[in-house]
Image (tube, rainbow, N blue to C red):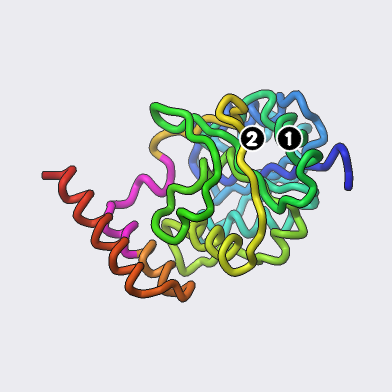
Amino acid sequence: MNKKPLISIITVCKNSELTIEKTIKSVINQNYQNIEYILIDGKSTDKTLSIIKKYKKKIKKIVSENDKGIYDAFNKGLKLAKGDLIGFVNSDDILIQNALSILVKYYNNYPDKDFFFGSVKKHWKVIHGYNPWKIHFMWGFYTSHSTGFYIKKKAAKKLGNYRLKYKFSADYDYFYRMIVHHKMKGIGTKKNELFGIFSRGGYSSKHNFLDHLKECTKIRIDNRQNKFIVLITFLMKYFYNLRKII
């Protein structure tokens, strides 16, 4: 196993001129430097591309073309990635300066693990830990997809692509296949071992609760989860959210 693994960081973006620079700087200014940085742009019409090109010497690959949505862009990044580890840092999120140094420590200390979840500051608190048993009942079993999740390349190849039929939550399907079907093993960092800051207003937050819930339910059904459990989790989530609105 490579003690100083190459880490592929993928940032996907579209019309992100207000946030893309801080994201890029957080990646290229890491303490750990064995990085392959890949930018996938969805044919931005604002100043995003001009900002990206300011840092082109630090970026391994820049792709700017139309796509079929964020998960299509993720798949393009996965196809290009050559690193021993692969992770995503979305265009409005920030990678903490020593995040990849912490990741490499876990990579070397836990060679049997397929993936890693780093602690992430999300909204008003730090989310940490990894609780795979929760995946059968709720999606809050991990810290974050962007900035927090890193997977070994060989495991990513086995899993395949993010499924484009899911528009809001294809990462849930990806994780369900990873943990339940393929039985891959992961670990979370300690609370103070922070990987990144997950910003408000990301892609998934721009869609209403019911659309999210319907798609999450479809993901569970498509993955052959017990339909009684799916029904119970749907009703609990629906009425809990309804109570908050009322």
Quarter of the figure that contains the C terminus: top left
Residue 163 is situated, as x and y percent measured from the top left of the image, at 53, 67
Q: Is residue 188 above or below residue 125?
A: below
In this rendering, position of residue 131 left or right of residue 226:
right
Q: Is residue 235 above or below residue 30?
A: below
69 or 161: nearer the eye? 161
Counting other residues with Cα less than 10 Å from the Cα at mark 2, is it few (<14), some (14-19), or many (20 or more)?
some
**Residue for point 15% across, 47% down:** 243
15 or 46: nearer the eye? 15
In this rendering, position of residue 214 left or right of residue 170:
left
State yes or no: discs 2 and 1 in contact (Cβ < 8 Å): yes
Looking at the image, can residue 88 be seen? Answer: no
What is the distance, in whole Å, between disc 2 and disc 1 at their CAs? 7 Å
Q: Main secondary structure of the magenta part?
A: helix
Q: Quadrant of residue 205?
A: top left
Q: Which residue is mark 2?
A: 52
In this rendering, position of residue 36 left or right of residue 126:
right
Q: Which residue is mark 1?
A: 56
Q: Amino acid at mark 1?
A: Lys
Q: Secondary structure at mark 1?
A: helix
**Residue for point 54% across, 39% down:** 129
Looking at the image, can residue 122 be seen? Answer: yes
Q: Quadrant of residue 7?
A: top right
Q: Amino acid at mark 2?
A: Ile
Segment colored magenta: 202-214
Residue 80 is situated, as x and y percent measured from the top left of the image, at 74, 55
Q: Quadrant of residue 225?
A: bottom left
**Residue for point 50% across, 37% down:** 16
Residue 107 is situated, as x and y percent measured from the top left of the image, at 76, 41
Q: Secondary structure at mark 2?
A: helix
